Image (tube, coloured by chain):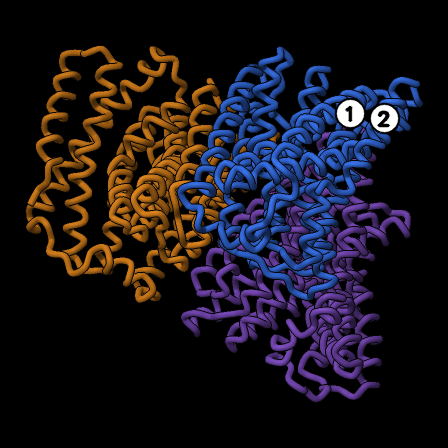
Chain colours: A purple, B orange, C blue
Amino acid sequence: MLKWFVPLSVVFFAGSLVGDLTHLPPVFSFFLTGIAIIPVAGWMGQATETLAIYAGPRVGGLLSATFGNAVELIIGIIALREGLQTLVKASITGSILGNLLFVLGISFLIGGIRHPIQRFNVKAARSQSAMLWLSVGVTFVLPAAFAASAKTDPSVGKVVSFVAAVVALVLYLSGLLFSLYTHRYLFETVHDAGEGHEQPPLSLWVAVVSLVITTVMVAFESEWLVGAVKVVGHRLGWSDVFMGVIVIAIVGNAAEHASAVWMAWKNKMELSTEIAVGSTLQVAMFVAPVLLLVSYAIGQPMSLLFSWPELMSMGAAVLLVVVLMLDGESNWLEGALALGAYFVMAVGFFMLKGLT
Amino acid sequence: MLKWFVPLSVVFFAGSLVGDLTHLPPVFSFFLTGIAIIPVAGWMGQATETLAIYAGPRVGGLLSATFGNAVELIIGIIALREGLQTLVKASITGSILGNLLFVLGISFLIGGIRHPIQRFNVKAARSQSAMLWLSVGVTFVLPAAFAASAKTDPSVGKVVSFVAAVVALVLYLSGLLFSLYTHRYLFETVHDAGEGHEQPPLSLWVAVVSLVITTVMVAFESEWLVGAVKVVGHRLGWSDVFMGVIVIAIVGNAAEHASAVWMAWKNKMELSTEIAVGSTLQVAMFVAPVLLLVSYAIGQPMSLLFSWPELMSMGAAVLLVVVLMLDGESNWLEGALALGAYFVMAVGFFMLKGLT
Amino acid sequence: MLKWFVPLSVVFFAGSLVGDLTHLPPVFSFFLTGIAIIPVAGWMGQATETLAIYAGPRVGGLLSATFGNAVELIIGIIALREGLQTLVKASITGSILGNLLFVLGISFLIGGIRHPIQRFNVKAARSQSAMLWLSVGVTFVLPAAFAASAKTDPSVGKVVSFVAAVVALVLYLSGLLFSLYTHRYLFETVHDAGEGHEQPPLSLWVAVVSLVITTVMVAFESEWLVGAVKVVGHRLGWSDVFMGVIVIAIVGNAAEHASAVWMAWKNKMELSTEIAVGSTLQVAMFVAPVLLLVSYAIGQPMSLLFSWPELMSMGAAVLLVVVLMLDGESNWLEGALALGAYFVMAVGFFMLKGLT
C-alpha cells in the first residue's frame, strides 16, 4: 500500500515543474523544490525497504544501506557537475551534524518528554562509537592536519584525503560484512524488534517501478534545487557553507529525521539511534567517499579536506554523542544538550561568509 | 552554630582594611586579602546552605547552585569594571582547571591513601561527562574555531561566543530543572547520603544577616585584591594570565576545594566528585555566561574567546576527567595523574608572558 | 633452553658485521641490520624475563618494565649522539602509533578471525585509558600548544616540554608503584593467566651473560643502522620522518609485535592488549622522557615538541583505542578499523617530506 507521500510527491513535483517552466522568483522556487524532495525521499525509502524485504535479510540489508542514501548521492553528483564542490562538502558536514546532533537531539528530547528514561543497546552504541570516531577523527581530521603541515605542496593533502576516503569506504563495506554476515546474530534482536516478520508493504513490481520513478523525480528536483542555490544564497545573504550545512543537509535527510523521531516517540530508542548514527556513518564512510570518486571520474575533482570550523564541529559532535550514548540511556536533557550544540554550530556557519 | 571561619573572617577583614588604609606594600596586601576571602567564602557557604535547608529541596537546590558562586561572580564583576577582561577570562580557565584537576586530583590522592579503591555513582558521573564536554568542547572551543577562520571579521567570533554563552546558560538552567524537578529521584540517594535530614546549622535570621554581611565583605576584599593584582604581577614578574589561572582561581574556589577533599577523606566520593565537577559546570555554564552578559551591561564587553593554550588545557582536562570517572572508581594513582596534568599546565601558564 | 632466535641472532649479526667491513651498498646493509636486530631483541627479551622470574614478582616487574625497552633506548641514544633528533622523535611517534594501531589492530584482526568475540578485563583497559590520554594529550599536546602560542620565545616550549617529560616519568614510576606494590592484587589474575608459576627457561648465569652479549650486539647493530639511515633515506626518497615513524619503529618493536599477535591467536586478549598498550605507555612515559634527559646530558638537546601531524595522529590513535577497548571486547572489524587508521597515517608520513 503506497502511503500519503505519493500524492504529496506528485503535487509538489508538478508545482516545482511549473515553477521552473514559468520562471518563478528563485527564492520561492528554491523552497518549493526543497520541500518537494522530502515526500519523494519518503516514497523512495518505502520502495527500498520493500525490495529489501523481498531480497531477504542479507542482500536486503545491503540494498537499504546503499540505496538509502540515493537522495544525498543524486543531489551531490548534480552539484559536483555544476562545480559546486564547496556546497557538496558543506552538505556532507551538514548531514553529519544534522544526523548526530539535530536528529538524535530531537529524538532524545521528544522521546524523553513522554518517557522519563529511555534505554537502548549499549553494545551497539559502543561499536558505532568507534566507527564514528574513525570516520571523523581519522578520515577527515588527519588529512587536514597533513595538508596544513605541507602548505607548499598541496598534493600531500589531496593524496592523503583520497587514500583516507578509500580506506573509509573499504571499512564501511567491512562493517556491512560484519553486521550482515560474520556477526549477524549480534544485530538480530535490534532488527526483529523493529521489523518482525513484516509483510512487504508493496508488491515487487510496484516497488521497482516506484524506485525508477522516484529516482527520476529526485534527479530533476535536485537539478532545480542546485540551480537555484547560487541565486538564492546571494539574495538572502546566505553563504554556500550555510546553504550546504543547514539547508541542503536538512532536505537530503528529512525522511530519516522523521522516522528517527517517530521511533523515539514510540520508545524504540534502538531503532532511533540506529537511524541517526547509522545515517551519519553512511554519509561519512559511503556517500562522501563515493562523491569523491565520482568527482574525479567526471573531471571536477573534490577533496575531502574540510575547513577547521567544520572539522571542529564534527569532532565536537562525535565526542558529545559518544559520551551521551555510552551509558545506553537517554533523557530530555541529553536531547537539549545535542540541540544546543547544533544551534551554536548553525549560528557559526551562518556568520561565516566564506571558509578558508 | 557559626563555625571557626567567622572569627577568622573578621580578623582577616580587619587586617586587610588596615592594610588598605595604611598603604601596606602591595605584595603583602595582595596575599593578605587573598587569604582573607577564604574564610568569608566558607561563612557565606554555610549561610547559603542553611537558607537552602529552610527553603526545601527544590528552591534550596536552586539557591545553592546560584549563590554558591557568589564569590567568583563578585570578584569577576569588580575586575570587569576595572577593564581587566584578560584576568577575568584567565580566572574562568583557572577555576575550571583547578576544580577538575587540582580539587579532583587532591581528593582522589588523599582519599586513595586511606581507602585503596573508592567508588561513586557511575550514572551521575556519565551524565556530568556530557555536560562537561558540551560546556568546554562546544561553548568554548567552537567559537574560537569560527573566530580563527574569520580573521578579517572579528564580529563572527564575538557573535558565536555570545550565542554559545546564552545557550550554555539555558542548558545550565535546564540541568537544574532536570535535577531538581523532572528527574529528582535520580539524585536523591546522593543528597541523602550527604545531608540526611539535617537540622539547619543556623537560625533563619542569622543566615540572612550572614549572607548580607559576607557579601559586603567579599565585595570590599575583591576590590582590594583586584586593585593589587596589576602592581603585584609586575613586581613578581607574574603575567595576568598566571595570576588569573592560578592565584585568583585558587582564592575564589578555596572553600569548595576544602570540602571536596574532606569528603574524599571520609570516603564520600559521591559528594567529593559532585563538588569538583559541579563547581566546574557552574563556572563554565553559569558564572562565565553571566559575567559575559554583565560585561555588556556595564559597557566593558568581554568575549569568551579563549587562547589556544587555555582551550587545549581545558579540553585535555575534560577528556582526562571523563576517562578517569568512567569506571566509577578512583585510587591514588588517578589522583596523581590529575595533579601531574595540573602541574604541567601551571608551569605553562607561568612561562607564558602574554596570550594571543 | 635458549630458543631459535639465538642462532638467528648470531648469523645476522655476523652478516651485518661482514656488510659493514666490506662496505656493502647501504640500502642492502640497512635492511640486513634492521632484520638482524629483531632476533637479538627476542633473545634479550627472554633473558630479561628469566631474570624477572628469579628476582620475584616485584623486582622482576620493575626489571621487565625498564629493560623491556632496552632496544629502543639504545637505538635512540646512538641516533641522538649523531644529532638525529628528528629521527628519534619520529621513532617515538612511530612506536606509539605502531603499538596502538598496528599491533593492537593485527591482534584484534587475527584473533578475531579465529574467535568471533574476544573478551578482556575492562577494568585494566579503563585504567590504562587514563594513562594513555595523559601521556599523549597532556605531556605531548600541551607543550606544543604553549610553544605555538609563544612563538617569539622558544624557551617556553622547551621548558614546558621538559617539565612535562619529568612529570610523565614520575607518573610512570608511580604507575609501577601502583601495579607492583600498593594495588598488586588487581593485576594478579592477569599475570597468573599468562605465566602461572613458570619455571625460568634459562639458568641465572645464562640469562646474565645473554643480557650482556645482546646489549653489545644491539649497540653495534644500532650504530650500523643509524649510520645507514641518512644514505638510505636519500636513495629511496624516504624522509627522516617516514624512516622514524615506520621503519625504525617497526624494527624497535618487532618482538612485542610478534608476541601480542601470538597471544591474540591463543585468545589471551588480556596479555595481548597489555603488551600493546603497555609498550605504548613505556615509550611515551619512560623511553621518551629518558631520551630527553639523555639528550641534555650528552649535549645534543632534544625537545619533545612534536609536529601537528604527529600530535593529531597520536591523539586520534589514543581516542580510537580508548573507544575500542571501553567495552572489554574485540572482534575482527575493530582490528580492521585500527589498521585502516594506521594505513592512512603511514601514507601521510610517507607523503610529508619534512615536518614543521
Q: Residue at x 25, y 58 (%)?
A: B191
Please indicate whether residue C98 sits to the left or right of residue C159 in the image: right
Q: Nearer the viewer, residue C21 or B107?
A: C21
Examine the rendering and report whether any part of residue C76 can be seen: yes
The amino acid sitting under disc 2 is Ser
Q: Is residue B152 above or below residue C42?
A: above
Residue C221 has which mark?
1
Say whether residue A143 is left or right of residue B252. right
Q: Is residue C79 above or below residue A196?
A: above
Residue at image position (72%, 19%) is C84
* Residue for point 8% across, 32% down: B7
The image position of residue C81, as x and y in percent, is 69, 15
Q: Quadrant of the C terminus of chain A?
A: top right
Which quadrant of the rendered structure holds the N terminus of chain A?
bottom right
Left or right, C188 with respect to A294, comes to left
Q: Nearer the viewer, residue A201 or B292?
A: A201
Q: Chain of mark 2?
A: C
Give the mark nearest the N terminus, 1 or 2. 2
- Residue B89: x, y in percent? 41, 31
| Neighbourhood count class around disc 2 (C-alpha, 10 Å): few under 14, some 14–19, many 20 upward | many
Q: Are marks 1 and 2 in contact (CB under 8 Å)?
A: yes
Q: Position of residue A48 (x, y in %)?
A: 76, 76
**Residue B194 x %, y %:** 23, 55
Q: Nearer the viewer, residue B178 or B39?
A: B39
Q: Secondary structure at mark 1?
A: helix
Give the residue type at disc 1: Glu
Which residue in the structure is indicated by mark 2? C16
Q: Is residue A314 in sight in this rendering?
A: no
Whole-number angstrom distance, CA of label 1 to CA of label 2:
7 Å
- Residue at 70% across, 62% down: A252
